[in-house]
């Protein structure tokens, strides 16, 4: 996971992002780094559609927690997506129409299943990838994030 982020994910996000709008999130469980994600804005400053597009450029959990739960009792993949969606929500007004996209290789069944589990839809092919999309509001609902507070207020069970 660390090698992929150092060699590929951060550079790809920097190349595609608006200036100063790349976000790298690290997920820790105690002292253990268990996940990382990169997202950025794809909307051009002169975009008149009104939609704000954000790309989930990379998303990975360490192999030792994949499919497993963290000390909070929450699955690592859900916790990581919650962190991403909460961070995106903190950057926008609740009135903004934010669309989040992710490109996934067809052979990456685990990532595809995870996104689908939390309400993302397959919207077609983009080069060699399958593009998934979800609105910020739908993602918040699927991940039990209370949008009225503007922060992630979920507190999972303590082990």
Image (cartoon, rainbow, N blue to C red):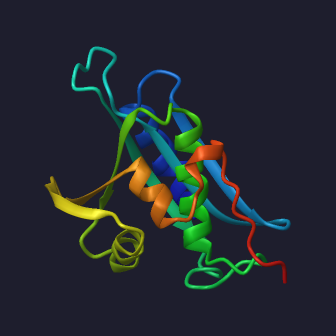
Task: Determine the residue located farthest toward the front in the rendered image.
Answer: 148
Judge from the rendering whether residue 70 lies leftward or rightward of residue 109; answer left or right.
right
In the image shown, does 140 or 124 lie closer to the viewer? 140
In the image shown, does 63 or 41 lie closer to the viewer? 41
Task: Determine the residue located farthest toward the top in the rendered image.
Answer: 46
Please provide percent x and percent y for residue 40: 45, 37
Please provide percent x and percent y for residue 130: 22, 62
Please provide percent x and percent y for residue 23: 56, 39
In the image shown, does 18 or 50 lie closer to the viewer? 50
Q: Is residue 45 above or below residue 118?
A: above
Q: Quadrant of the N terminus?
A: bottom right
Q: Residue at x 27, y 76 (%)?
A: 107
Q: Residue at x 67, y 82 (%)?
A: 69
Q: Is residue 46 above or below residue 79?
A: above
Q: Is residue 151 above or below residue 77?
A: above
Please provide percent x and percent y for residue 25: 63, 49
Q: Residue at x 28, y 66 (%)?
A: 105
Would you say residue 2 is visible in this rendering?
no
Q: Is residue 42 above or below residue 48?
A: below
Using the rendered view, name the quadrant where residue 46 is placed: top left
Judge from the rendering whether residue 30 lies leftward or rightward of residue 105; answer left or right.
right
Using the rendered view, name the quadrant where residue 77 is placed: bottom right
Would you say residue 130 is visible in this rendering?
yes
Q: How many numbered marks are there?
A: 0
Q: Residue at x 62, y 85 (%)?
A: 68
Judge from the rendering whether residue 125 lies leftward or rightward of residue 30; answer left or right.
left
Judge from the rendering whether residue 108 lies leftward or rightward of residue 82; answer left or right.
left
Q: Quadrant of the C terminus?
A: bottom right
């Amino acid at each position: 996971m660390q090698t992929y982020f150092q060699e590929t994910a951060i550079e790809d996000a920097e190349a595609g992002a608006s200036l100063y709008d790349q976000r790298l999130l690290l997920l820790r469980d105690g002292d253990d780094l268990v996940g990382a994600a990169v997202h950025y804005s794809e909307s051009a400053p002169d975009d008149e559609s009104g939609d704000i597009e954000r790309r989930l450029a990379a998303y990975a959990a360490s192999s030792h927690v994949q499919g497993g739960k963290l000390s909070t009792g929450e699955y690592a993949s859900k916790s990581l997506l919650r962190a991403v969606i909460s961070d995106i929500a903190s950057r926008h007004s609740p009135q903004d129409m934010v669309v989040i996209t992710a490109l996934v290789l067809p052979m990456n069944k685990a990532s595809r299943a995870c996104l689908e589990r939390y309400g993302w839809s397959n919207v077609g092919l983009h080069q060699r990838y399958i593009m998934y999309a979800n609105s910020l509001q739908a993602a918040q609902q699927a991940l039990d994030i209370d949008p009225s507070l503007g922060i992630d207020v979920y507190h999972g069970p303590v082990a």
